[in-house]
Amino acid sequence: MNNLVVRQPQSDRSGCHWRPARQCCGTGRLAARGTRQFQFAGAPGRFDAAARARRTRLVVLTAILAACGLCLRGEGQTPASPVGGSAQGGAGLASEQSVLAPTPSSGGLREPAIAPDPGPVRLCQALGPAAPCNICAVDGSQCDRRYWGGWERARAIAWQAYAQGEYVGHERLAHVPEYRIRVDDQLDLIYRLTRIETPDPYRLNVGDEVRVESFSDANLNRDLIIQPDGTITLRLLGQVRATGLTVTQLRDNLETAYARFYKVPSITVTPLKVNTKLEDLRAAVDRRYGVGGQSQPVRVTPEGTIALPAIGSVPAQGLTLPELQQELNERYRQVVEGIEVMPILLARAPRYVYVLGEVTTPGRFELSGPTTVIQAISMAGGWKIGGNLRQVVVFRRGDDWRLMATMLNLEAALMGNKACPPGEIWLSDSDIVIVPKSAIQRADDFIEMVFTKGIYGVFPMQAAINFSKLSSL
């Protein structure tokens, strides 16, 4: 059984040694047994000529031995029985899936022997599902542009910590250090009662309910709701201002007013229902009987604002979620106490990239995650024959909407000749990727348009050559 021995490099300059194998990392078998792995050996920038010569001699020797084996097998064969179900026919079928083993009774000839069952094919894995399986690869962060291809810098690195396709996933760095809200982002604002003691005494508002009582005259006792004009109606006094006053201030005002009628009015004011502004705000965002909770879904408008109850339009574009939370809480604190707002990003605004030119399916594609130029070309179905991969153009709009453009050379990377292509850049929202036509393709289009569909289409011409007459000359 051929084993693949993964050797750790003794130094950063040591090369990797690759060979076809049926096992990976010492345990398990490759599911695809015909897979051949490559690796460059020797110093960076040079190929190992001696190793190449040894491989060539090994291939030639293997071919000679295979030819000799075929000759010996041809000499040892016996005529097969015409009956397909005979024992000899069965042996012939079995010999196709057997290996040749020498026996003393055959006089040097080899007879077919059934190969042992290799057992179930298992996934390529290391000592455990989370143990690294080092293979030879190129680290793009350590590429040296002095070398053209970059493959000569292949080293044994921990390529797959989870050999079964990394289905458990790796933690990666964040896409951006901080996300800033943009137009068409969808937010969900969660409202929560703080129930924190306020430093200032509570002042009555419209809709609050109070109870006015007098120990001198029980006929003055009544429950009152502060009217929209901010007053309450009392016996002997009529309309009395109540909004903006604390409970103590309202009691003192009533005590002074009733002193004209009673020696000792003994007025008491008891708040029955307060914070009506807060209750009104809760009613505006209450979805406990719908989608659930006290929340308000909003979408950032094209002018970069969001509209909320009680505080109106609030600028949101360009702010982070913590900055927006601080802004909303400050604005609500000026209107009503005892509530806190927490914004949650529900869905980002759609981001698109446009790929056109010499690709299979040009069009607009959504950027669901970080995307590079080569990934965008693959989303468009790949490039066509005749596309100029040396001059791929990318157009981009800056933050101030100015137009920027760059030209990339992706031919070496797409042909597998460059391990660290500098043109494999990240794309942004609304980028335009153009794969232009090559000079040969443009010339072909010109000939077809001018001659095939142009001149020949207007003046059809036909020519025939008789080769039989030409041969008699």
Image (spheres, rainbow, N blue to C red):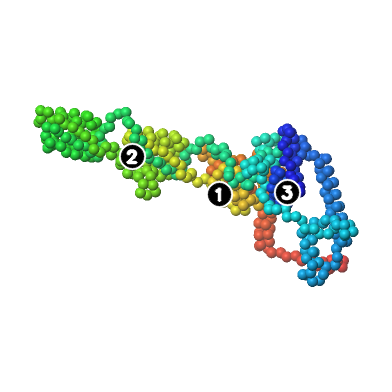
Residue where numbered disc 3 is placed: 22
Mark 1 surroundings: few (<14), some (14-19) or many (≥20) residues within 10 A: some
- Tell me the distance, in whole angstroms, between the alpha carbons under discs 1 and 2: 40 Å
Q: Is residue 313 left or right of residue 350?
A: left
Q: Tell which of 20 and 374 is nearer to you.
A: 20
x and y percentages locating residue 42 in the rendered image: 77, 37
> Residue at coordinates 44% horizontally, 41% vertically from top-left?
344
Indicate which disc, 1 or 2, sits on the residue closer to the N terminus. Answer: 2
Task: Tell me the kind of residue under disc 2.
Answer: Ala
| Residue found at x 48% / y 37% | 180
Three-letter residue code for mark 1: Phe
How far across and down, in percent of the image, does residue 37 sit?
Answer: 73, 46
Where is mark 1, residue-wise? 365
What distance separates the C-alpha of mark 2 from that of mark 3?
70 Å
Tag 3 or tag 2, which sits nearer the N-term? 3
Q: Callout 3: 10 Å neighbours few (<14), some, many (20+)?
A: many
Is label 1 in a helix, a strand or a loop? strand
Q: Can you identify the residue that label 2 sits on?
A: 310
Q: Nearer the viewer, residue 143 or 266?
A: 266
Q: Measuring 55% from the left and 49% from the top, which residue is drawn there?
A: 365
